[in-house]
Amino acid sequence: MVITETFVRDVIRHSRVSLGLPPSQDETIDVAHVAASLRRAADILCPCSPSTLEGAVMESFLHLTNEIEPLAQVTSSAVESLILYGDLLELDHVTIDNPLVKSNWVFPAPPSFVRRPSGGVFIIGIAPDASTPLPQSLSDRIEYQGFTRILMPLPTEDLPVVLRGLGLLELPAATWLKSPRPTAPADLLSSMVQKLTSQERSGHIPDLSILDTTRNVGFYSGRWVTPTTETGNFVARRPQAYGAPLWVFAQLIDGKIIKLLDLPLKGNRWRGCDVAWQLQMAIDYLRGTPQLYRRRPAPTGAILDFFSPLPLWMQRRLSIVGRQEPREGCLFSYWVPEREVAIEEAFLQSDAWLKRREVLEEGNGDGTNNQGND
């Protein structure tokens, strides 16, 4: 028996090849590698909880890096992103007749694709017992951009026809984005206030935190405060015994909670954070201090910087049009191709009620405690 010494770089290289990824130039475990590993783990383990997927992938990487804590953060973020992009489905998006399945479990989505305005396609879903739903000739052409997989057509190729012929489902962009019906900010706020005022009087809730509407809209984490003397209606979070704090819409008088409305509302399929963030956009817009985004020039397009969280359906739209980029003095950024920039800016201003700002005042920008976990 011959024992051969194997180096970390060789293990990483072979792992990437087995997952259908292009070779790596160093020993770094990048985002694409983490995302592909999670898809493979989901094929084997699902249905299961997101934490089960995280644990399985982290265990496989345990002896391949010294940067365990940063990698754990990337892995946790990757699970959320795979749910966001549609590779993983949450329980409320599938039908299953199994009382043992827990409410927080996820399932692998079937191999599908969504057309991009650029002419390419966005590959989503997980192929059973395979690293990719595509044959080698197509998988070699995939562009891995962070958590996403992009496939561009050849000059004479009808790519959607090819993919449908391979059994992939084509999802219309509107279906994949799953965006709610457009509404005016005044109508949204009026409806939510009406529902809030119809609630019974609330008792004392310790450790409540609110989004202070008077604070700088360009510094999201700085807007979260413990109420003292505030009066009005506020997007807020209240603690629970287990898990992340719950999102609520709260009525306060002199810093004391009078009534509250849990988010999301019953029958609403959006996450509590999505409903809360859209509601806060409406509140800020109607106060005359709309939330901000910034446009920066970039090769073949522009980068849009955001300083407050966006609801899930808006992030999905930006993902299908462009790609997420490393942030610079903001919460997150997206690159958008030049031909799509004007359309996306118009959407952000009309449907998200945001205002473009080229230069931010000192003190605006990045907030590390973004209160973004649902």
Image (cartoon, rainbow, N blue to C red):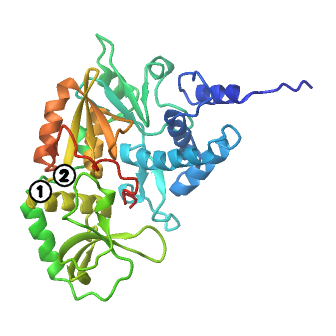
Q: Is residue 245 left or right of 9 when viewed as pictured? A: left
Q: Is residue 342 left or right of 12 when viewed as pictured? A: left
The residue located at (33%, 58%) in the rendering is 221
Residue 214 image offset from top left, x and y in percent:
18, 64
Q: Is residue 74 above or below residue 230?
A: above
The residue located at (64%, 25%) in the rendering is 13
Residue 328 image offset from top left, x and y in percent:
35, 38
> Which residue is at the front of the view, 138 or 24?
24
Circle number at residue 69: none
The kind of residue tagged 2 is Gln
Q: Residue furthest front?
A: 362
Image quarter hosting the N terminus: top right
Q: Is residue 75 left or right of 166 when viewed as pictured? A: right
| Disc 1 and disc 2 in contact, CB within 8 angstroms | yes
Q: Quadrant of residue 294?
A: top left
Q: Circle 1: is it few (<14), some (14-19), or many (20+) Cα within 10 Å?
A: some
Residue identifier under label 2: 291
- On the question of residue 176 being in view, the answer is no
Q: Residue furthest right?
A: 1
Q: Circle 2: is it few (<14), some (14-19), or many (20+) Cα within 10 Å?
A: many
Provide the secondary structure element on which disc 1 rests.
Answer: helix
Q: Is residue 225 above or below residue 42?
A: below
Residue identifier under label 1: 285
Q: Quadrant of residue 66?
A: top right
The residue located at (63%, 28%) in the rendering is 27
Provide the secondary structure element on which disc 2 rests.
Answer: loop
Residue 341 image offset from top left, x and y in percent:
18, 31
